[in-house]
Amino acid sequence: MKVRAAVLRSPGTPPVVEEVELAEPRVGEILVRIEAAGVCHSDYHYMTGDLTAPLPLVLGHEGAGVVEAVGPQASGRISVGDRVALLWRPRCGSCEACLSGNPVLCELGKVQAATGGLPDGTSRLSLPDGGALHHLMGVSCFADHVVVNENAAVVVPDGVPAEIAAISACAVITGVGAVWNVVSHAAGRPLLVIGAGGVGLSAIMGAALTGAHPIIAIDIDDHKLELARDFGATVTVNSRQTDATAAVLAATDGRGVPWAIEAIGRPATLRQALDCTAAGGTVVAVGLGAVDTEFAVPLNQLVQRQKRVVGSLYGSSNPFIDLPRIFALYLAGRLPLGRLLGDRMPLTSVAEAYDRLVGGAVGRGILTP
C-alpha cells in the first residue's frame, strides 16, 4: 500500500514527507493507522548524525494508533480495532534479557539497529522505485500507517487519548520508569532531576508519586521550570542564573541528594549530577548524546564517597507491565500527562516541529497524520 511518511535521506538535511510503499504485515506483525506521534529528541540525534542508522529511513518512534490488520499466525493478544501504543524496543521473550525480566535489553535490539528492519532484520518499507527504505527502531511512526511486530505494541484502554498513549510509550515510561525501576527508598528523601523536557518532567511526576522530598529540578528555561513545579518539583534552579550545585547542597543541608536523574545526555550535566550527589548516592543517566560522547568521573569521589553512575534505557522498564500502570494512573488523575503536551502539528510540518524542539519549545510536540 502507498503511505505518506517523513523520510530522512542523509544527516544534516531536513526530513521530507513523501509517498512510499508499505508491505502487508507478515507472521506476528500488525498494520497500524497512526493517530499521533511524539516529537522526541532522539529522532533529532539521527537527523544530525550524532546517532547513526541505515539510511534512508522513516523517522518516528513514539506513536499510537488503531490496528487495521493482523498478519498470519497472530498470538491473539492484539486484534483489529484495538488502539495501541508502539514500543521502540523489541521483545523476543526467549533471550536471557527477556527471561530475566529486563526486556529492554532484548538481543533483537541489535538486529533492528544494525539492519534498519523489524526484529527479523527485514523492512516492510520501500521507495516508489523499489529502492531500500528502513525502519527507525522498528517503529517509524512519522507516517500515516506502519507495520510493526505485535510485541512492539501495547493495547491502550478507553479514555486514554492517542497523544497521551504516544508519549507514554517513550518519554513518560523513560522518566517515570527510571524512578520506579532504578531509584529505591525515595519516600521522604531528596531527589534531583536535571533537564525539564518530556523525560525529565516525567521523572518529576514519578518522584512525586513515590513521595520523594524535596524534589529538585534544574534547567535553563524558566517556563520549563514553572512546568516542573506544576508536576511536583519543590525546588527549581535556573543554572544560567544560579550556581546549581550550590543550590542543591543548600536545599539538602549540605549533604547532597541520594538520587540524581540526568535527562539531557551531556557530559557537563552528568558531572553536575555527580557533584550534587551525597556520599553513597547514585546518578541515573537516561539522556542520550552523540555516539562517541564520554564524561570524566573523578575517581576519588567514586571510591572515597562510594558514589555510583548507572544507565537506564527506556526507564529500565517492562513495558507490558509498566505502560498499563501508567495508563491506569493517568485515568485515575494521578499522572497529569495532558500538561506535557505542546504544539499539535500536521505530519507535513515535521521539519518545523524539530526547529521548535531545538529552539526550546515547552511541552511535547505532537504530529498528526
Image (tube, rainbow, N blue to C red):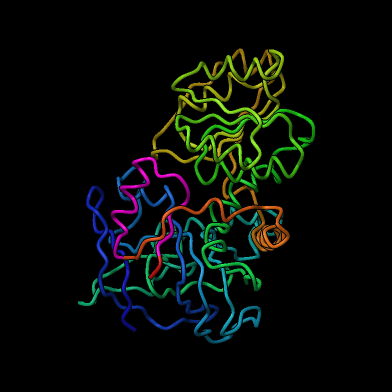
Task: Residue at 52% x, 46% y: name it.
Answer: 198
Task: Residue at 70% x, 19% y: name it.
Answer: 252
Left/right of residue 288 with respect to residue 209 in the rendered view: left
In which quadrant of the rendered view does residue 330 lie? Answer: bottom right
Residue 291, image x, y percentages = 39, 40
Nearer to the camera, 142 or 133: 142
In which quadrant of the rendered view does residue 4 lie? Answer: bottom left
Nearer to the camera, 68 or 50: 68
Left/right of residue 308 with respect to residue 368 in the rendered view: right
- Count up the numbered dots: 0
Residue 318, image x, y percentages = 67, 57
Instruction: Please report the bounds of the magenta region as a residue range.
Output: 348-367
363 within the magenta span: yes
The quarter of the rendered structure image containing the N terminus is bottom left
Q: Residue furthest left?
A: 129
In which quadrant of the rendered view does residue 213 lie? Answer: top right
Residue 203, image x, y percentages = 62, 42
The quarter of the rendered structure image containing the C terminus is bottom left
**Residue 316 sits above or below residue 217 on the image:** below
Residue 221, image x, y percentages = 45, 33
Nearer to the camera, 126 or 3: 3
17 within the magenta span: no
**Residue 292 sits above or below residue 82 on the image:** above
Task: Residue at 70% x, 57% y: name it.
Answer: 333
